[in-house]
Image: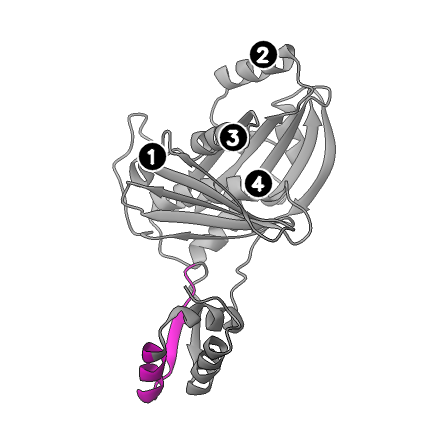
Amino acid sequence: MKENKSVLYKYLVLNKQARLITSFTTDVVNDYCKNIMATPVVVATMGRLITATLMMGSMLKGNESVMVSIDGDGPIGIIRAEADSVGHVRAYASHPEVSAPLNDRKMLNVAAVVGSNGTLSVRKQLNMKEPFIGTCELVSGEIGEDISYYFGVSEQTPTIVALGVLLNTDGTCKQAGGFMIQLLPNATSEAYDYLDNLLKNLTSVSKLIEEATSPQDFALKLFDEVDELFNYELKYQCSCSLEKTKELITQLSFKELDEAIKDNKGLDVTCNFCSHTYHLSDDDLKDVINMKKENHFQVK
């Protein structure tokens, strides 16, 4: 890929019988790596999740957002990524230090660290009072297959999700991206047959991206004709703040907050997504206590 390495494109294809989303996320994945000490297989895992979540975010509008969480039985623990409708994403892994032997194809074994037993959940903050939440069981731990399955069982939308991540010898991301194809209600049997044949002949997604000279060239490797709807650049950007941190620690008990104030050292809280540490002074902690007393936030 010779152009911007963090960009998303959305098209109509197959005579407007399907939508195609392509996402190139190399720079975004490397920005994620700057915040955390992740092993190569975790970089590959989170690169796939970040790419898929950004494509799901492109289906939203306004200030809506989507969070994809996977809780498998693999050693990485819980992984999640959150994206909005304009290309901002952040991601988190419980255990970024884990590793696994290469798989039978001598490739990084994403399924081994994620696990094939567990659940995938999607939480969409839409312009509604309550968020939309959908869940499904994991089918492979390969992430792309699991998200394809989620769309089929939870949203009843036939969807193909293909993801790929290539690494440099130093463990940084060389190439990351993928595509998502969704059949529309007017899709004919011929459209289904085309996608079935596409899947059967699909080679490495990351290799296709690496060989593409432009986003349009990548799309044309999949379809003879594409009708571009929009495109935008992607960015790793955390939405944490001091105020949100105060809101978060309202979950602590009054006793725990009082003890932190008595220690006269304040409280340090580190964001899981970007590793930024917020220091809450005694005055900040007193603000949190007042928030709890006034019931400004729901305490669970």
Query: Residue 66's x, y, as percent?
Result: 55, 47
Residue displayed at 35% across by 44% down: 71
Location of mark 4 (residue): 56
Residue 193's mark? 2
Three-letter code for the amino acid on which mark 4 is drawn = Met
Is disc 3 in contact with disc 2, using a CB cutoff of under 8 Å?
A: no
Q: Is residue 35 magenta?
A: no
Location of mark 1 (residue): 111
Q: Earlier in the sequence, mark 1 or mark 3?
A: 1
- The quadrant of the image that shows the N terminus is top right
Location of mark 3 (residue): 161
In the rendered image of this protein, does residue 287 appear above or below residue 64? below
Whether residue 108 appears in this view of the structure is: no
Is disc 4 in contact with disc 1, using a CB cutoff of under 8 Å?
A: no
Drawn side of residue 245 relative to residue 220, left or right:
left
Three-letter code for the amino acid on which mark 3 is drawn = Val
Three-letter code for the amino acid on which mark 1 is drawn = Ala
Query: Residue 50's x, y, as percent?
Result: 49, 45
Q: Earlier in the sequence, mark 4 or mark 1?
A: 4
Whether residue 2 appears in this view of the structure is: yes
Alpha carbon distance from label 1 to label 3: 16 Å
